[in-house]
Image (spheres, helix red, strand yellow):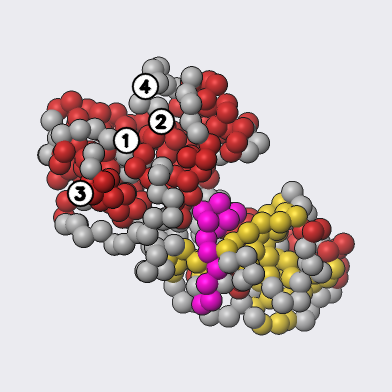
Amino acid sequence: MSAAVGAALKKIAIYILGDKDKRGKLFVAVGSIAAGFLGLMCLPVAVLSSMGSMEIESPEIDKSLFNESAIMAGLDSEQQAQITDLQNQGQAIEDAMTNAGVRSQTIKAQLIYMSYFDEVQNFNAESYANLFAVAPNDSDLIAAINSTYGLEIDYDEYMRSYTWVMNSTINEYMFSDESTKNCADLAAWAENAYISGWGYMSGFIGERNESDRIRYADNAGLMLGYLNYDSTEKVFTSDYNTLVYTEQGGLDTMPETAGIGLFDGSQHGIYVGNGEVVFSSADCGYVTKEVVSSGGWSSWCTYEGVDYPQEVTDAVESLNGDSSSEN
């Protein structure tokens, strides 16, 4: 494959993966596009593995090509069967990940399968999903997948691909309750921003910057992005322009609940459990994570617009906290 074709496929991959409607049916279609135009079958997301710091521009392509019937019409019967099989396996993986209690990792599971499993025989989605359910981290997950399926997935290569894919979209599988704005999903939102490599940029709340196609959020914008994100329409609204918060007490009074806000007097973070906090840092230039005790976090807070569980309500009532602030 020529360098020009490779670059084009990378742009097409980002274009598809950045649009939920296209990704939903055509996540597997980068390979089919290559097949239709070039007479070969490429893995759909393998083109992302060597992206590095490549600058992504909006692809100059005919958007009418990106519908299932148009793509399938350009393939021979064998290629159509391959695409149909990939689509079926993608759905089987989604179902298995949901049943295993790790629905939020569905895109990760599909990405790994589509990138590396072309030679794997007798694939079982349930057994595959179980590896994600028991792995304590991605490094152990990749090691387990390599051992189980006789693969040689390079962890750094996988991380480059995964970060680029996740940065190009908002993970639809991470929300536990899309009908409300709740602290559990706020924690998931923060974790996703960290995993996806969001950068720090003033005035951003999670949108992609048109110049470099990277997602950014400033410190308050990380929370405002969640409050403004419409997960049904897959767009950011302008319902919340200011982050309104209430400091409730010192960290020694904080309930062990993911999604609670932390405050150090100037910047906010989201507690994500296991003694860790995620926040968008102007000093670092990106969304980062640290152990709560290693930072300067001094109080915990709740945010207007976010629903909290009973244990948080009980803690607030016991503290009688009633002073509100804005950021």
Mark 2: amino acid: Tyr
The span from disc 3 to disc 1 (Cα, nearest Å) is 19 Å
Mark 4: amino acid: Glu
Q: Is residue 138 visible?
A: yes
The span from disc 1 to disc 4 (Cα, nearest Å) is 12 Å
Give the foreground label among 3 and 1. 1
Category of crowding for the residue at label 4, using alpha-carbon neighbours closer than 10 angstroms: few (below 14), some (14–19), many (at least 20) = few
Query: Which residue is painted at 52% across and 60% down in the image?
Result: 198
- Tell me whether circle 3 and circle 1 mark residues in contact (CB < 8 Å): no
Q: Is residue 103 visible?
A: no
* Highlighted range, magenta: 191-203
Q: Which residue is mark 3?
A: 67
**Furthest-front residue in this view:** 3
Q: Which residue is mark 1?
A: 43
Category of crowding for the residue at label 2, using alpha-carbon neighbours closer than 10 angstroms: few (below 14), some (14–19), many (at least 20) = some
Q: What percent of the width, then of the height, locates residue 118?
A: 35, 26
Q: Which mark is residue 24?
A: none
Category of crowding for the residue at label 1, using alpha-carbon neighbours closer than 10 angstroms: few (below 14), some (14–19), many (at least 20) = many
> Would you say residue 198 sits in the magenta stretch?
yes
Give the structural element (helix, strand or loop) at label 1. loop
> Mark 3 or mark 2, which has the lower sequence index?
3
Q: Quadrant of residue 40?
A: top left
Give the structural element (helix, strand or loop) at label 2. helix
Q: What percent of the width, then of the height, locates residue 144?
A: 57, 26
- Tell me whether circle 4 and circle 2 mark residues in contact (CB < 8 Å): no
Q: Which mark is residue 116?
A: 2
Front-lying residue, 182 or 107:
107
- Tell me whether circle 2 and circle 1 mark residues in contact (CB < 8 Å): yes
The quadrant in which the N terminus is found is top left
